Image (cartoon, rainbow, N blue to C red):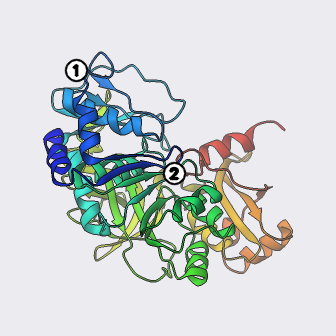
Amino acid sequence: MLYERWREVAREFAGEIALRELGTARAWTFAQLDAGAESTRVPDRSGPFAFPKSNAPGFIFTVLRAWRFGQIVCPLEAGAAPSITPRPASGICLLKTTSGSTGAARHVAFTEAQLAADPDNLVATMGLRRDSPNLGVISLAHSYGFSNLVLPLLLHGIPLVLVPSGLPEALRQAAVTGGNWTLPAVPALWRAWHEAGAIPTNLRLAISAGAPLPLALEQAVFARSGLKLHNFLGCSECGGIAYDASDTPRTDATFAGSAVRNVSLSRGDDGCLVVSGANVGETYWPEPDARLGGGSFRTSDLVELRGDGVLLRGRASDLINVAGRKVAPETIEQVLLTHPAVRECLVLGLPSTDTARGDEVAAVVAVREEVTVEQLREFLHARLPDWQIPREWRRVESLNVNARGKLSRTEWRNEMQSPA
């Protein structure tokens, strides 16, 4: 199904440019990509799996050859080694590796129909177009990049331009090559580009996913350039979930967007979001989990649903238990980020020395101007109950995100509990 659909795309747009690599100035038409996939008589690797890796043209060719020979695609981040896993049941074409943000990393298995459904939904929801090529800055191996960059190219004929890095200067050089671009990125990149004045003026569509998009950043980018950053919520288990298609900045940081086309959203008995649709993966592999299967995925995101809109209320696994009272760290973060001196922050729970108390609230902050911890405490005291005010504070130059553009509470929790 997938390879046949690709060949139809390749025939329809044969002479048009499909893929560019700006670092080497190389380019391939759709016909040339097709010829490259067809020229190999044997799979890239022996065995049932193919492991596309790195943000390079070879990633695309590896995927196409895997589809041609019926291999299971297992995208790998740069530096990652292939994991040994039993071959899934017949019909599985992709194994995504989850981020492990809620536990140990594992695989999500997809059939061809499930895999194709996600880019179909995203193209329809976001208005992805062939006359606005995707700038490839984020990882092709991550679920976000695979669904927004690789699959729209191969299944919808939307050209892809690979940018050498996410540095501001690399983005400036990419933008001046002409055209109206679509740029999917993560908040950390949008912040770096904004602060460097490097956001191109010829972007038709700007998308932010992978981590919560700070309201202040969204509003600052719009105020400077008139560019709307469209917040996008997705996950490895199903791809796209919700998208903010509005033309102006959000006024509520908890608003993730409205349901992606052809995706149904509901709220489970535990208050967590349930996603249903043809794009939902088949199962976890090799260990199944009752949360995923049968066309639905029960997330750990606490939500409020208003019509088809999704308001995020935190993650069930991140809730901080202070003497029996529970608070989502995002509740405190959103208030802390309204302080003019706070650039970035992360709130988490640490085990209290008083076992009856449960957790202590802790905050890691990066500031843009001098401010004392006491001043931050006073600011929060005027806006939050006393029991939600962090007792422990850590000042840092910057909160470093991981390769997927996320801040890991687990990593920061481990660091703050480690001996100095």
Quadrant that contains the N terminus:
top left
* Residue 197 found in image quarter: bottom right
Who is closer to the viewer here, 361 or 344? 344
Quadrant housing residue 214: bottom right
What label does residue 163 carry, if any? 2
In the rendered view, tell whether residue 228 sits above or below residue 189: below
Q: Which mark is residue 41?
A: 1
Closest to the observer, 32 or 299:
32
Q: Is residue 394 above or below residue 28?
A: below
The C terminus, quarter of image:
top right
Q: Position of residue 125 (x, y in %)?
A: 28, 68
Residue type at the position of mark 1: Arg
Disc 2 is placed on an element classified as loop
Q: Please tell me which residue is depicted at 63% across the width and 69% down the height of the picture.
A: 194
The residue type indicated by label 2 comes to Val
Residues 319 and 130: in front is 130
* Residue 188 locus on image (x, y percent): 60, 58
Q: Residue at x 29, y 69 (%)?
A: 127
Tally the numbered discs: 2
Instruction: Return the mark for residue 334.
Output: none
- Distance (Cα) linking label 2 and label 1: 30 Å
Q: Nearer the viewer, residue 269 or 238?
A: 238
Q: Is residue 124 left or right of residue 215?
A: left
Q: Tell me, yes or no, if residue 212 can be seen here.
A: no
In the image, taking residue 334 as reference, residue 82 lies left or right, namely: left
